[in-house]
């Protein structure tokens, strides 16, 4: 059985690989996409999506690879902070509380085959 922390790290790794693969060779990984419906273009004006509805174009551009990479970094920082916050003393992590706090994050990937239904979180 995979721990909830391992599950989340694996999903973040997948998201990073997919985001990096979406960048054209030589494009900085901070380059943001833009929407000009019906098209979406990369930072160097390369056409990414040829035709979509205006609201979809905004959504696609807003969730570009640069943002996906930034989100992965931010979530890893949050997980590290949560881990530190759940130490009872210098050597003892309260894993139950730590894992409970990770449940809402794991739920993002609840459709993934490795998601454990025991991690389900009721809002």
Image: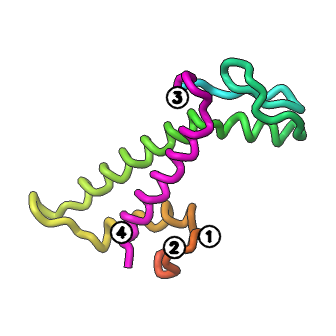
CA distance separating discs 3 and 4: 31 Å
Residue 62, picture quadrant: top right
Residue bounds of the magenta highlight: 1-28
Residue pointed to by mark 3: 29
C-beta proximity under 8 Å, tags 2 and 1: yes
Label 1: element kind:
loop
Q: Nearer the viewer, residue 114 or 78?
A: 114
Q: Nearer the viewer, residue 97 or 54?
A: 54
Image coordinates for residue 2, horizontal then vertical, percent: 38, 73
In this picture, is 106 found above or below 113? Answer: above
CA distance separating discs 4 and 2: 14 Å
Residue 111, numbered label = 1
Label 4: element kind:
helix
Which image quarter holds the N terminus? bottom left
Residue pointed to by mark 4: 99
C-beta proximity under 8 Å, tags 1 and 3: no
């Amino acid at each position: 059985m995979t721990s909830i922390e391992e599950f989340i790290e694996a999903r973040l790794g997948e998201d990073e690989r997919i985001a990096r693969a979406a960048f054209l060779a030589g494009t900085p990984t901070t380059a943001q996409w833009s929407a000009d419906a019906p098209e979406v273009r990369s930072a160097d004006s390369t056409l990414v999506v040829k035709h979509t509805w205006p609201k979809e174009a905004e959504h696609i551009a807003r969730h570009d690879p640069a943002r996906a990479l930034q989100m992965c970094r931010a979530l890893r920082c949050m997980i590290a902070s949560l881990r530190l916050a759940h130490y009872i003393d210098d050597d003892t992590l309260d894993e139950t509380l730590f894992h409970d706090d990770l449940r809402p994050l794991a739920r993002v990937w609840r459709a993934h085959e490795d998601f454990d239904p025991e991690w389900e979180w009721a809002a």
